[in-house]
Amino acid sequence: MKTIDQVFATNKKIGLMTHVVAGYPDLAATADLIRLMADSGVDLVEIQIPFSDPLADGPTIMRASQHALDNGITTNDCFRLAEDMANKVDIPLLFMTYGNIPFAMGMERFMRRSAGAGIQGLIIPDLPFDEETDDHLTLAHKAGLKVIQVTSPSTNKKRLEKVCSIAEGFIYSTLKVGITGAGTDIDDQGIAFLNRIRSLTDLPIAAGFGISSPEHVEKLMGKTDMAVIGSHVINLYEKKGPQGVARFLEQCRHVGS
């Protein structure tokens, strides 16, 4: 399996990172979707561990998470899914979750189990770098995991400088303030913020929140290294099935080829 660093070392004009909710609509379908994404040229997949009280999820992902929870999907199911997928795809897998999940399991145990399942990185938007409880950054590093730092256009200059100084792997930035969700446009504020990040670090940048068309991906070329597509993939899956998702990803992949 490629590492996160190897993915960003390629010379693509822009890569693709996609998002799935583990257990939506069921675990078998999630596994099929991850394989489809890898086969469609996606570079990274973040697997969301469903959680009942999210911070940044929009209505589509909230609905998918609640569906998974209603069907009894547990964190242990997510570990098993990740382990299965890590043996079947050659692209890096990340967990996206909220702080309550690792706290409930025990931070160190969660880190060890994530790494053991083949996960390479964690995105935990409500667990920032200066959260002192259990020193999650140290425990993640001990397990061999990268903790991806999350920023948004509301991040002030001083904090952004600090984030850039301690970030690893890549920086994940939202393109807008608020919650996830497919959008119709990418505003100038989001683009301007990506430029601010770029001026502070040589680390790769992944940008998401609102990307729902190949034109959006094209608009981000030169501004970010990776386009993150979440809610739109779920919407497509519901309306047009796996083949609809595959066609869309193929269109987006050609933007960066």
Image (tube, rainbow, N blue to C red):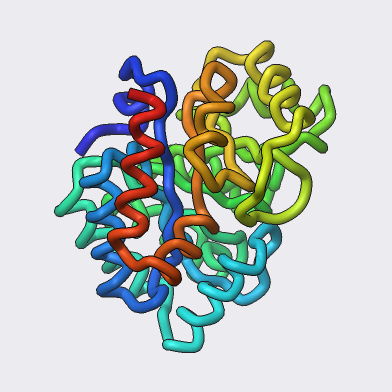
Seen in the picture, residue 197 relative to 109 is either above or below; the reply is above
Q: Is residue 84 left or right of residue 105?
A: left
Q: Is residue 254 left or right of residue 107?
A: left
Q: Is residue 73 left or right of residue 79?
A: right
Nearer to me, 108 or 161: 161
What residue lies at 54% left-to-right and 13% top-to-bottom? Answer: 202
Q: Position of residue 15 (x, y in %)?
A: 40, 30
Q: Looking at the rendering, in which quadrant would you find the N terminus?
A: top left
What residue lies at 51% left-to-right and 58% top-to-bottom? Answer: 107
Nearer to me, 160 or 249: 249
Q: Position of residue 227 (x, y in %)?
A: 50, 36
What residue lies at 77% left-to-right and 34% top-to-bottom? Answer: 153
Quarter-wise, where is residue 28 in the image? Answer: bottom left
Q: Looking at the rendering, in which quadrant would you find the C terminus?
A: top left
Seen in the picture, residue 180 relative to 256 is either above or below; the reply is below
Q: Position of residue 242 (x, y in %)?
A: 30, 63
Q: Is residue 137 left or right of residue 184?
A: left
What residue lies at 68% left-to-right and 41% top-to-bottom? Answer: 185
> Of all residues shown, which one is farthest toward the left?
88
